[in-house]
Amino acid sequence: MVKEVALGIDIGGTTTTFGIVDHQGNILADSKIMTHAKEHVTRFLPRLYEALNTLINDCPSPILLKGAGIGAPNGNYLRGTVEKPANLRWGDETPLAELISKEFGVPTVLTNDANAAALGEMRYGATKGMKNFLMITLGTGLGSGLVVDGKLVYGHTGFAGELGHMNVKEEGREGPFGLKGSLEAYVSVTGIRRTVSKMLADSAADSQLRDISYNQLTGEMITDAALKGDKIALAAFDYTGQFLGKALATAILFLSPEAIVLFGGLANAKDLIFQPTLKHMDTYMHPVFKGSVKLMLSELQHKNAAVLGSAALIWEELDKRSA
Amino acid sequence: MVKEVALGIDIGGTTTTFGIVDHQGNILADSKIMTHAKEHVTRFLPRLYEALNTLINDCPSPILLKGAGIGAPNGNYLRGTVEKPANLRWGDETPLAELISKEFGVPTVLTNDANAAALGEMRYGATKGMKNFLMITLGTGLGSGLVVDGKLVYGHTGFAGELGHMNVKEEGREGPFGLKGSLEAYVSVTGIRRTVSKMLADSAADSQLRDISYNQLTGEMITDAALKGDKIALAAFDYTGQFLGKALATAILFLSPEAIVLFGGLANAKDLIFQPTLKHMDTYMHPVFKGSVKLMLSELQHKNAAVLGSAALIWEELDKRSA
């Protein structure tokens, strides 16, 4: 029997992953290509088309392609464009949804990776059946996807839900565009690395992290040290959780979600990040919301979440059209 | 000809106003009764019913009542209840929507006053035709209503959009529930009064406000002084705008609205509050949103906004049901 499927495509700063996904979230086949920061989009696209065509042609079972979903940095859902992505030399604007749609002859929808992750979680993960929740992705930066009344929030510009840029500290750490004290400068892999650096300066405690350079330091190394009781690493997680908890208390005032889902490398540290976050969330939470919000770990952490999320994006769209 | 109308009821801390409103937002008749903080709801309601029945019976033209909308402090749309209102001795929970519905035999919907104001603005005011905007009401406290994709955001609990309680200053001014540094402790009539008090202490400048006690001081007095060039009053507006501007920059990251509408006494100070707010909003705004948001004054300032908003609530509902 021919199976109806969607292409899920996730364009990352170093890797682009893609897969063939059915309506139930089964990945029939997947693959990836490198994304080169300096490669122009006109050279990148033919490589992507070729890899996608190979994937489709080599798919083990007979399929009918119904659509494609794309998660991309600075992806604008409303316009279908990738606009000035920070880590790619793609120029001001690439009409990627239209290009992919033409190439494969199917409806194509695009958004940013955190929004795609939120939809993936809603269809296939921890927030199945929920109408109001937030997705927070903790990677190099902090991404977020807001779901209100069962739908992603895009806002007037298509760029709603950029919580990583909210100010959490007066005259705080430097970030891009001259903005200081943004959440992601504290809460992200980069953020906790900066925090370790600060703790190494402020504290006199011994630490296995004193032997690792700033650039070599990874989230896994900090987690590993914390699990062994390293004081610097533990203090760094606590400090990270303070900022995350406070920011989430604000997010709850805005949207009163049923759950907040954490995704990405830092989220794997589980209690190390969950406990201080919950504590500070509670400190700043208005009583009317107490007990109303679950803080959860993504259920797609060890699956191909990026591909599932991108595929979920187009399935949502196709379901809406046929409703 | 018999006109289809709705009851709009706004329950305030000192006054309850209500009116008969047609689909186009014409107020056919309106009236009010006092709200006594210490009066129990079982005594208040018979007075309200009587006043509403008088209004309906005395209405100059023939009408057909289609529904009732209620704006009330701590009004929960999802449950139709007023829950622990701060300034009324109503107890834990009053099922007000159900009570009014039974009394008048029409569908009745309830929400808080800021949400009702947002709907009023969307149907009859400055944001006609807009799908994404925020309403900020600056009164004794700071209320807000968030409209996403043409609908009010209620969230999982029904209490979404409580921006007045967001933390804007570490170890800042005391507020209820042990929360410190909340937005409304700075941005509201109470907030600017506190700020004047601080400025009178910090500054050595002469000011006409030095002759007025804290409790006597009103928003109008501060506006009046500022318009005459009073340095303390001007500094107080600037300080207020700093906090409002920064909070709105965060709100824009969340929801990317097309407009933010200011309503209430403080908003009437116009440039005095708009200019510092815009300046600080810009300082904290991520470039992707620059130029995308209009800061507007409510167009219902001098109309019976509370009644129009409450009526808009039920018209929205009835339109949805018949759609």
Image: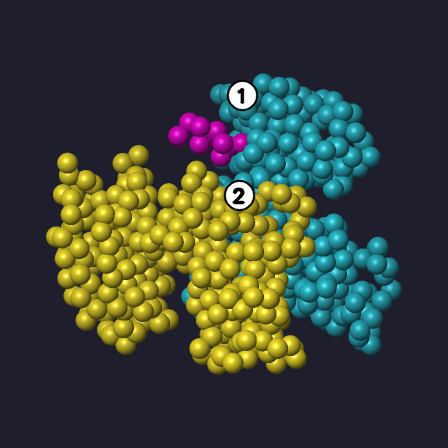
Chain colours: A cyan, B yellow
Name the amino acid, label 1.
Answer: Leu
Q: In this image, A323 relative to B96: left or right?
A: right
In the image, is residue A317 part of the stretch drawn in magenta?
A: yes
Q: Position of residue B194 (x, y in %)?
A: 53, 74
Q: In this image, B95 relative to A295: left or right?
A: left
Instruction: Tell me the quadrant of the picture where the N terminus of chain B can be found.
Output: top left
Chain ID, mark 1: A
Chain ID, mark 2: B
Q: Which residue is mark 2?
A: B258
Q: In this image, A262 relative to A171: left or right?
A: left
| Residue A64 circle label | 1
**SS type, badge 1:** strand
Instruction: Tell me the quadrant of the picture where the C terminus of chain B can be found.
Output: top left
The residue at the point 72 percent across, 64 percent down is A171
Residues in magenta, as a range: A314-323
Magenta stretch, main secondary structure, is: helix
Q: Position of residue A179 (x, y in %)?
A: 72, 54
Tell me the distance, in whole angstroms, between the alpha carbons under discs 2 and 1. 40 Å
